Amino acid sequence: MPLISEIDFGTPASRSEKMVTLTIDGNEITVPEGTSIMRASMEAGIEVPKLCATDMMDSFGSCRLCLVEIEGRAGMPASCTTPVAPGIKVSTQTERLKDVRRGVMELYISDHPLDCLTCAANGDCELQDMAGAVGLRDVRYGYDGENHVKARSNGSININWAPKDESNPYFTFDPAKCIVCSRCVRACEEVQGTFALTIEGRGFDSRVSAGMHENFLDSECVSCGACVQACPTATLTEKSVIEIGQPEHSVVTTCAYCGVGCSFKAEMRGEELVRMVPWKDGQANRGHSCVKGRFAYGYSTHKERILNPMIREKISDPWREVSWEEALAHTAAEFRRIQYQHGRDSVGGITSSRCTNEETYLVQKLVRAGFGNNNVDTCARVCHSPTGYGLGATFGTSAGTQNFDSVEQTDVVIIIGANPTDGHPVFASRLKKRLRQGAKLIIVDPRRIDMVSSPHIKASHHLPLRPGTNVAVMTSLAHVIVTEGLYDEKFIRERCDWSEFEDWAAFVAEPHHSPEEVEKLSGVPAEEIRGAARLFATGGNGSIYYGLGVTEHSQGSTTVMAIANLAMATGNIGRPGVGVNPLRGQNNVQGSCDMGSFPHELPGYRHVSDDATRDIFEKLWGVTLSNEPGLRIPNMLDAAVDGSFKGIYIQGEDILQSDPDTKHVSAGLAAMECVVVQDLFLNETANYAHVFLPGSTFLEKDGTFTNAERRINRVRKVMTPRNGYADWEVTQKLAQAMGLNWNYSHPSEIMDEIAATTPSFAMVSYDYLEKMGSVQWPCNEKAPLGSPIMHVNGFVRGKGKFIRTEYVATDEKTGPRFPLLLTTGRILSQYNVGAQTRRTDNVVWHEEDRLEIHPNDAEMRGVRDGDWVKLMSRSGDTTLRALITERVAPGVVYTTFHHPTTQANVITTDYSDWATNCPEYKVTAVQVSPSNGPSQWQVDYDEQARQSRRIAGKMEAAE
C-alpha cells in the first residue's frame, strides 16, 4: 500500500467553456481558455520546474524556475502567469532555459542549509526535487557572504539569522530554511482567509512573519495547516514528522469532527499515524482543513482511553475489568431481566452522531428488533431535530438543499444562528473567499461573530437580535419582501401552492410584523431589517446557512419554516448558489437521522406507523415491529424518574454533559438499573453507568459518514482497533448475546442492507463509492450520480408549502433576579463536549470555558477580566472566569460547553421546541456575580465523578 500521490498542476483549473489549442514541446494539446501554460504542460504530462506555484492558489510568478520560451515572443515568461493562446508553440526545455534555471537554483541553495540527510523533509522536499530536476551540480557562491543560515557569521552574531519558532504545538517554523516563495502567506490569504502571515522587509531582508513579528502561537494563526501543506521546504514542518519520520503509506478517510466531512489522507508508518493531510479530491473540503481535522487526532492514543470492558453492580462501586464475553453476556442478561420485570418498553437506546452510518443503523435495529420497541433517539434531538421537522413540512425532505461547492456561485448570503469560523471552519474559508470576490453578507446573530468583520470581509448588515426573537426577525424580513413586491411570483406560481402563498403573504404583511414593530421585540434597528431584506431579495443568488442558534429554541422548528418561506418567496431554491443549508454540528448527525435514529421514524424518514415500510423491515429482520413511536431522550429521562424506564444503551454520546438541565439528566440516569455506555473514555455519563464497553476511533473502522450536504463519504480503517473491536462489531456481539442471528462480516454488508431497504440510498454500495469517490443522497435509479442540488425541477413533497410563522415569546423570561440572557456555543479549537479535543494539544488555545460579558454589565457587577464569577439561573449555578468583550451586546452573556468542570448545562432549563423537544439552550435567564470559588454543586459533582471513575486495581481514570 503506497503513499497516495496527488498531481500538482501548478495553477488552478480554468472554468471557461471555450477551448484553446497550442503546442508544447511538439505535443498538441487543447485546454480551456485561461489555463496557464504550466497547467497545460502538466496536463500533457510535461512537468515544468516550479517552487512558488501550486494549484491550490492563484499564480504568483516569483521563483523564476518555471520559465518557458514561446516561438515568436521575446524573453522567457513564467509559465505559471502566462495563459495559453491559440496556436502558440511553447518550449519548456532549451539550453538557455537550463542555464537560467540552474543559475536561479544556485542562488536559492547559496542561502539554504545543506543538512538534507538530517532534515525532516528529506524525501519530501520540493527544493531538493527541483535541484535535481534542473541538474544542479555546484553552487558557486558559498556561504561567505550574507546569509540567513548560520547563527554566527565570521565569529560575530548574524543579524539575518532567526531562531526556530516551536511555539505552535503541532508544527515548527525554521526561518533559516525559508526561500521566501510566499506560498505560506498566499495559502493563509487565499485558501484559509485569515491573513495571519506576511512578508516583512524587502530584498535580501525579506522573511515570513506571523503577525507583527510574533511567534505563531501568539499570532492570529488558526493552525489550519494550509501554510505547512504549502511549504516546499522544511521551513514549516509537522512536529509529528520530525519525531516519527516520513510516512510510507496512506489511506483516504473522512474526518470525525464537524459536519463539513473533510476528506484526508491518513499518512502512516506501519500502524502509527504520522500526519493527516487534506485530500484535494475531497469534494467537501477541496484540499483544505482546520486545526481539529489536521492535527487533533492524538486522543486516539491518549493514556486515558479505556481499552477493556468494565462492569459494576452500583454506580458507587469501583469499576471491574472483565472480558468481552462477560461484559456482553451480563448486559444482555440485565436487559432481559429488566424487560421481564418492567415490561418491553422499559429499555431503549441512543445512537451516536460520531459513529458511522452502519453502526448507527445497527443500534436502531437492535432497539427495534432486539428490544422490541421504538425507544431509540440520537443527539440530533438536542441539535437539528427542528431542521427535520421544518424542512420536511415545507420542502418534503429533512436535509439541506445544496452542496458546499454551491457557495462559489452565491451572491448574497444570510448566516443566522451559526458561527462558521469556529463551528465549520473549512466551509467558512470557502465562504470568505466568495465574499472577497464580491458576494454580500447578512449576519443574524446576538454576538458579533468573526464573520461580521474580519480581514477583507465585512457584513453588509449585522442584525444583533435579542436571543429568542429569531421568528420575529425572519418574519419581518418576509414582511418587507412581500409589502414591497420583491417576491418571485413566477417561481412561486410554478413551484409552490399559490393559495398558501397568498395566505402566508397576507399574514406576514400584517402591521405587527413590520420592522418598526419587530425592533421593539428584537432590538434590531428597523432600517437594518429593511436593508437586509431588500439586499437578499434583489441581490442575485441568495443562500441561507444556519446552525444551532436557529434550532435550539422553543420556536426552533418555526424558525426553520420561516427560513424556508423566505427562500421560496425569493425563488432561491433548486439551482447552484442558492438554497437552505443547515450547518450540522457533528460528523454524522445527518447520517444518524438518515439511519432511523428517531423514535417515530425508520431509516429514510418513514414513519413507524406506515404498514408498507414496516413490512419491508419485518420480512428482512424476521420480527414484528411496533407501530407506536417510542420515547425521545427527554421522555426516557422523565420515565426513568417516574420509575417505568430502567435500562439504556448509549453509544458514543455524553448526554450528562451535552443535554440540558444537568440535574434532571443525572436524576434520570441514577434512577435506572442498567446504564450501558460505549465510548472511548469514561465520559460524564459513565459516572452513572453500570457497564462500560470501550469504543473505537474513526481510524480503527470501516464505514461511511454523511455530512451536512448529504454527502456519503467512506471511512477507512488505517489501524487495528486498540480495544479489540470496531463499534459495529460490539453492537453485533451484543445483539447475538440477546439471541439475534446477526452475522455481518464487514460494514459493506450493512450498507447493502441499508440500500436494499432505504430508497434514497438504493444505489449506494462500497464498490460504487470507490468508483464515484462520494455521492449525495438521494442516489437511486432516478439520480444515479447522486443529488448535489435538491428540488431542481420540483419539491420532494410536490408543491412547496408556505406556513404561517407566528412569533411566540419563550416562557424563559428575564427579571429582577435574572436580568441577563445566556446563550451558548462552540469555539474553533474544541469540539462538542470536548472529550476528544481536550485530550489533544488544542487545549493550549482553550483550556477552560469562559463567560463573555459586555463591559457595561461587568462594570455594574464589579467584575474585571479574568475574575471568577458565579453564573446562576432558575435551574442551577456554576462558576467560571469572565471574559470582558464587546462581542456580546449589553444584557447578553455567552459561554461554551466544552469542559465538564464548568458544566454549563446545569444552568440551562427544560424548555424545548414545541414540535421536537429540541432544548432551548440559546435562551436562559441568568444573573452574574463575583465569586471566590466553585459552587457547591461543582464541588459535589467533582467528588461524585472522582468516586465513580475508580477502577479496581488501578488509579483513577480521569475524564
Image (cartoon, rainbow, N blue to C red):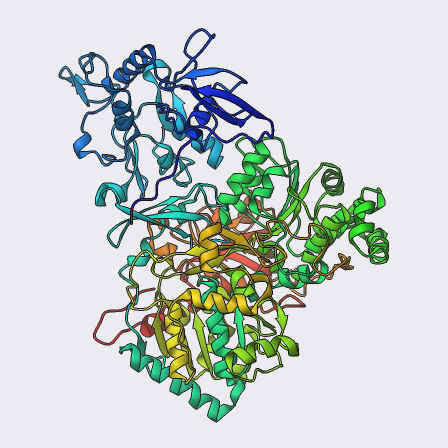
Name the quarter where the C terminus is drawn.
bottom left
Say if residue 420 shows up in the picture.
yes
Say which of 457 and 390 sits in front: 390
Say which of 69 and 440 sits in front: 69
Give the quarter of the image for residue 329: bottom left
853 relative position to 570: left or right: left
730 relative position to 259: left or right: left
Say if residue 261 shows up in the picture.
no
Spot occupied by residue 936 in the image (x, y as percentages of width and height): 42, 68
Residue farthest toward the left in the current orientation of the protein: 155
Spot occupied by residue 306 in the image (x, y as percentages of width and height): 30, 67
Spot occupied by residue 196 in the image (x, y as percentages of width and height): 43, 32
Relative vertical location of residue 884 with respect to residue 132 in this rendering, above or below: below
Relative vertical location of residue 504 with respect to residue 322 in this rendering, above or below: above
Say which of 299 and 15 sits in front: 15
Spot occupied by residue 279 in the image (x, y as percentages of width and height): 41, 44
Residue farthest toward the bottom in the current orientation of the protein: 341
169 relative position to 611: left or right: left
> What residue do we see at 30% from left, 14% from top?
98
Give the quarter of the image for residue 144: top left
How many discs mark residues in the rendered view?
0
